[in-house]
């Protein structure tokens, strides 16, 4: 500053002072203006900053409120989704790549428990089964499979679906898991498979139609029975398969029944594709919709043509004579009782004619049984030609025939018919190249004069017939009271029978029974004989009837059993002895089972060694006493044999009921192998052994063995022999 001038002012001046003051004020004012400007600017900035902050805060408040609302909505939505998931009937879960579940609905816990990962939720074997499907899903594949497992001791099935969850790079980060319990569906499928299997393989024909009867479906058995393939009948009406054997009224009643009840069962004839007619057992059932309207008809049917033919053959065999085709004794007795009831109701007389052929034995002995059979057939034909359509001609057996003349309005009709019958029988018979001359003797009993019931009428007609024979044959005789003298003779025979027991005049012979497979004698039938002091050796037919009528049969039966048991002890426990038990004993007294068991214990003999033979007619009665006494035999472990099988059609119903051990096949069946096979098969199905009786020749034996008979007896194997000879026979074999 040396170059600056130095100015020194001394004193004062108003002008200078004013100038200085003015400058200072100007500077101060400018400073104040600048400060004010800064303050204003600061205020404006501050105000602007405050407004911006408040705006941001307002926006923050709006954003927060929006975010909170969104969170609430998300929470509500999640809650709803959780509620939906928990109430779904299927399992919903989410699994990460470590196989941990980050989400599980309530159904998951109910089925798989509280497992947090797949290994905890499944048994080890099931986990190993599931692992391959899991790997495919984590590889990016949507997987569906079914899995079986045990739940609550039941076999259950689940349908599993794995859906991959991909991130933005397409990488699988987890799996959506869905599982549905399909156990019920599986059971239905299995049931449907079984139903289809049964439908396709059933032996019964099955057909499904619509409500109008138009065929919708048939099974293979239908085609096999009818001959029609399914495509040939589907769309056709079911009635087109039926036969003309039934008329329109039959089908009308059938349809009405189905309409009202939804069900029909019966037998109906159908026509095979080849034109043949066959009988079926048919059942119709209706399937209704939810409104109760018919929706479908289901028909099940079985071809029973052969069964009916077999039943018819057995029924005819049981009720009709196989040789002549006439009613046999069983059918005759039944018709006689019916005609007696009808005659009593209508108050009209009736007659019974008992006919025995004269000279028939001579024909049999000289020409042979074949010619004898031809003769019997021709006799049956001539008898039928001599009577009315309302009358009954029957063959009781051998050469004995009966005729029932019902509703007699004129007494002279009896004489006319009998005379015409005898004249017809007296005419020569052409038997192939031979001529046979025979005649007939007839006895007549009238209802109600000569008897009120069948037994009395038969007995009186039989007595009248014997009188006609005694008078010279080829004639007839009415029953007369003096014929009762024959009854007196029977009483005398009964008294002699009582003495026979005391005098030890009764004997036992044994008819060997062979096992048709081994040929060994394993059983024997005990046969009674009477060593009469005057008449010699009497057969059972000569005195058993008298014994039954007088009650002596009870004592005889006890003697036979005791004697047979004593002799059987020597034959060994494995050998069986058959003892005939009279039907009279079952009807009129209690069977002495306890006494029999005491006898067997005394002989150290098993009850199984004794076989009690009863006749088929006894089972037909099937009253309370008979049932009780038969049961007492079963309880005692005694075996039961049914004799004379084939005479009663009702006996088939009682074979199983009475637990029969042996069935004795009547010799009349031996000429029909098919019928023999049917009876033997039926018996074997019921666990019954079959014994063929009265085998007389090799031809009969061959048929019976082919039919499957277990045992056989008859003159082909030998005559009845004594106990000593039987014992030697058993030792020799």
Image (cartoon, rainbow, N blue to C red):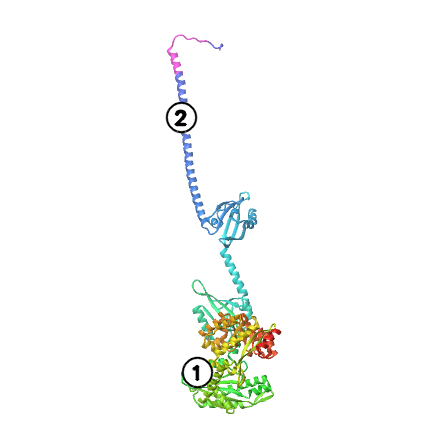
Tell me how far mark 2 sits from mark 1, CA to CA: 153 Å
> Can you see residue 239?
no
Question: Can you give x and y, in whole percent of width and height, for residue 224 in the image?
Answer: 56, 69
- Residue 19 colored in magenta in the image: yes
The quadrant where residue 48 appears: top left
| Outermost residue to the bottom | 472
In depth, the one of 47 and 371 nearer the eye is 371
**Where residue 40 is drawn, which disc sits there?**
2
Q: Residue at x 55, y 86 (%)?
A: 378
To which residue does mark 1 refer? 453
Side of 54 where 637 appears, left or right: right
**Where residue 315 is drawn, which disc sits there?**
none
In the displayed structure, would residue 416 be above or below residue 561? below
In depth, the one of 301 and 724 nearer the eye is 724
Question: Can you give x and y, in whole percent of width and height, for residue 197 in the image?
Answer: 54, 63
Magenta highlight range: 6-23
Question: Can you give x and y, in whole percent of width and height, for residue 370 in the image?
Answer: 59, 83
Question: Which of the image's four quarters has the C terminus?
Answer: bottom right
Q: Residue at x 40, y 84 (%)?
A: 346
Q: Count numbered badges in the picture.
A: 2
Q: Residue at x 38, y 13 (%)?
A: 18
Q: Mark 2 or mark 1: name the one nearer the start of the chain.
A: 2
- Please tell me whether mark 1 sits on a helix, a strand or a loop: loop
Q: Are marks 2 and 1 in contact (CB under 8 Å)?
A: no
Mark 1 is surrounded, within 10 Å at the Cα level, by few (under 14), some (14 to 19) or many (20 or more) other residues, namely some
- Residue 713 colored in magenta in the image: no
In the displayed structure, would residue 351 be above or below residue 241? below
């Amino acid at each position: 500053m040396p170059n600056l001038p130095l100015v020194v002012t001394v004193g004062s001046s108003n002008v200078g002072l004013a100038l200085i003051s003015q400058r200072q004020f100007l500077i101060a004012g400018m400073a104040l203006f600048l400060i004010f400007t800064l303050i204003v600017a600061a205020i404006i900035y501050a105000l602007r900053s405050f407004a911006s902050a408040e705006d941001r805060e307002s926006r923050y408040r709006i954003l927060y409120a929006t975010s909170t609302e969104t969170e609430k909505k998300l929470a509500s939505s999640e809650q709803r989704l959780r509620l939906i998931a928990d109430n779904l009937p299927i399992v919903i879960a989410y699994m990460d790549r470590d196989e941990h579940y980050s989400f599980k609905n309530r159904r998951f816990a109910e089925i798989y428990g509280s497992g947090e990962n797949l290994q905890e939720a499944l048994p080890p074997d099931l986990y190993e089964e599931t692992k391959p499907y899991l790997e495919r899903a984590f590889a990016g594949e949507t997987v569906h499979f079914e899995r079986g497992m045990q739940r609550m001791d039941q076999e259950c099935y689940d349908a599993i679906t794995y859906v991959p969850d991909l991130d933005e790079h397409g990488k699988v980060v987890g799996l959506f898991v869905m599982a549905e319990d399909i156990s019920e569906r599986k059971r239905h499928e299995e049931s449907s498979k079984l139903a289809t299997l049964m439908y396709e393989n059933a032996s019964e024909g099955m057909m499904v139609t619509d409500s109008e009867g138009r065929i919708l479906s048939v099974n293979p058995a239908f085609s096999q029975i009818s001959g029609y393939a399914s495509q040939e009948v589907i769309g056709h009406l079911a009635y087109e398969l039926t036969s003309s054997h039934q008329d329109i009224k039959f089908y009308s009643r059938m349809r009405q029944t189905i309409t009202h009840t939804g069900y029909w069962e019966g037998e109906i004839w159908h026509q095979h594709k080849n034109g043949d007619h066959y009988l079926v057992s048919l059942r119709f059932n209706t399937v209704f919709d939810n409104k109760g309207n018919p929706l479908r008809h289901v028909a099940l049917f079985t071809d029973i043509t052969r069964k009916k033919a077999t039943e018819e053959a057995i029924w005819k065999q049981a009720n009709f004579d196989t040789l002549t085709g006439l009613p046999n004794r069983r059918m005759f007795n039944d018709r006689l009782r019916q005609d007696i009831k009808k005659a009593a109701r209508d108050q009209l007389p009736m007659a019974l004619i008992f006919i025995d052929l004269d000279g028939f034995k001579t024909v049999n002995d000289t020409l042979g049984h074949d010619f004898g059979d031809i003769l019997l057939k021709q006799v049956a034909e001539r008898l039928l030609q001599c009577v009315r359509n309302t009358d009954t001609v029957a063959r009781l057996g051998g050469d004995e025939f009966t005729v029932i003349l019902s509703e007699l309005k004129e007494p002279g009709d009896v004489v006319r018919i009998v005379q015409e019958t005898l004249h017809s029988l007296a005419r020569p018979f052409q038997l192939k190249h031979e001529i046979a001359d025979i005649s007939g003797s007839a006895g007549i009993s009238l209802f109600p004069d000569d008897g009120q019931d069948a037994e009395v009428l038969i007995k009186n007609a039989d007595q009248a017939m014997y009188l006609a024979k005694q008078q010279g044959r080829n004639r007839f005789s009415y029953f007369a009271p003096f014929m009762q003298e024959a009854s007196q003779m029977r009483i005398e025979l009964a008294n002699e029978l009582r003495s026979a027991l005391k005098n030890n005049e009764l004997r036992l012979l044994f008819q060997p029974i062979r096992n048709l497979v081994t040929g060994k004698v394993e059983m024997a039938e005990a046969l009674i004989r009477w060593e009469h002091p005057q008449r010699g050796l009497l057969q059972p037919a000569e005195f058993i009837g008298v014994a039954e009528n007088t009650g002596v049969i009870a004592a005889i039966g006890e003697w036979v059993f005791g004697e047979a048991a004593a002799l059987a002890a020597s034959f060994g426990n494995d050998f069986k002895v058959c003892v005939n038990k009279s039907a009279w004993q079952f009807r009129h007294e209690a069977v002495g089972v306890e006494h029999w068991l005491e006898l067997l214990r005394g002989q150290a003999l098993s009850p199984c060694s004794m076989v009690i033979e009863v006749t088929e007619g006894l089972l037909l009665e099937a009253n309370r006493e008979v049932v009780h006494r038969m049961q007492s035999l079963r309880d005692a472990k005694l075996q039961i044999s049914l004799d004379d099988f084939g005479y009663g059609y009702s006996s088939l119903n009682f074979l199983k009921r009475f637990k029969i051990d042996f069935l004795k096949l009547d010799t009349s069946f031996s000429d029909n192998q098919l019928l023999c096979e049917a009876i033997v098969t039926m018996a074997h199905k019921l666990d019954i052994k079959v014994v063929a009786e009265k085998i007389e020749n090799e031809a009969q034996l061959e048929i019976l063995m082919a039919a499957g008979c277990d045992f056989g007896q008859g003159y082909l194997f030998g005559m009845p022999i004594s106990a000593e000879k039987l014992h030697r026979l058993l030792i020799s074999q």
